[in-house]
Image: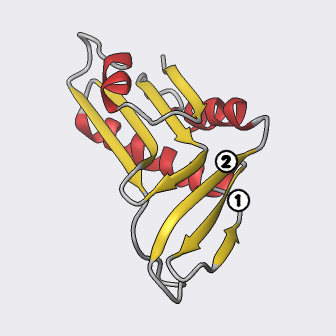
Amino acid sequence: MTVVRIARISAEPLDLTAHLDAVEDATAGAITTFIGRVRDHDPDAAAAVRALEYTAHPDAERVLTALAQEASGDAGVLVAVSHRVGSLSVGEAAVIIAVAAAHRGTAFEVCRQLIERIKTDLPVWKRQTEVDGTSTWLGLGG
C-alpha cells in the first residue's frame, strides 16, 4: 500500500533530511530523491536567470497529494514531496521528492512519474526574473 507521508506546499525552505526521515522504513531497500533547483539559465530566456517566484492555487496541496498517490499507484511505496512558493534565488530547492520502495526500480519509476506529473498538473505558476530585469510568467506546473 502506498503511503504519502508528506505532500506540502511551503513558503519555507525545503529540507531534504525531513523528506528522507519521512520515508524511512525497514522494508525499504531503496530510497530515491529528486531535488529541483532554480538554475541560472533558461533556454528561452534572453539573459541569465536571477530568481523565480512561485505562486500556488489554494488547492495545490490537495492536488499534490493526489498526484503522489496517482504516480505511486499500487506500488507499495512511501512518498514525501514538497513544492516551494514565494521568491527563490538561484540554487534554492523548488521541489523535493523522496520515494522509498522495496526495490530501486520501483523507487526510481515512481519518483520520475511524480515529477513529470507535478510539471504538467500541479496548479503552480512561476515568474522568472532575468538579470536584465525582464520578467515572464510561465504556465501551469513548476
- Within 10 angstroms of label 1, few (less than 14), some, or many (20 or more) residues? some
* In the image, residue 9 above or below residue 141: above
| Residue 10 on image: x %, y % | 58, 33
| Residue 9 on image: x %, y % | 61, 34
* CA distance for labels 1 and 2: 7 Å
- Within 10 angstroms of label 2, few (less than 14), some, or many (20 or more) residues? many
Residue 78 is tagged as: none
Residue 140 is tagged as: 1
* In the image, residue 49 above or below residue 126: below
Colour scheme shown: secondary structure
* Residue at 42% from the left image edge and 40% from the top image edge: 96
Instruction: Say what amino acid the circle numbered 1 marks.
Output: Leu
Q: Judge from the rendering whether residue 3 lies leftward or rightward of residue 29; answer left or right.
A: right
Between 99 and 105, which is closer to the camera in this rendering? 99
Q: Judge from the rendering whether residue 111 lies leftward or rightward of residue 72; answer left or right.
A: left
Between 123 and 120, which is closer to the camera in this rendering? 123
* Residue at 29% from the left image edge and 12% from the top image edge: 25
* Residue at 23% from the left image edge and 29% from the top image edge: 30
Residue found farthest to the top: 26
Q: Which residue is under mark 2?
A: 122
| Residue 104 on image: x %, y % | 24, 36
Say which label, 1 or 2, has the lower sequence index.
2
**Circle 2: element type:** loop
* Residue at 65% from the left image edge and 74% from the top image edge: 135
Kindly indicate whether the residue at mark 2 contacts the one at mark 1 (C-beta within 8 angstroms). yes
Q: How many marks?
A: 2
| Residue 20 on image: x %, y % | 31, 25
Instruction: Say what amino acid the circle numbered 2 marks.
Output: Leu
Q: Judge from the rendering whether residue 42 lies leftward or rightward of residue 120; answer left or right.
A: left
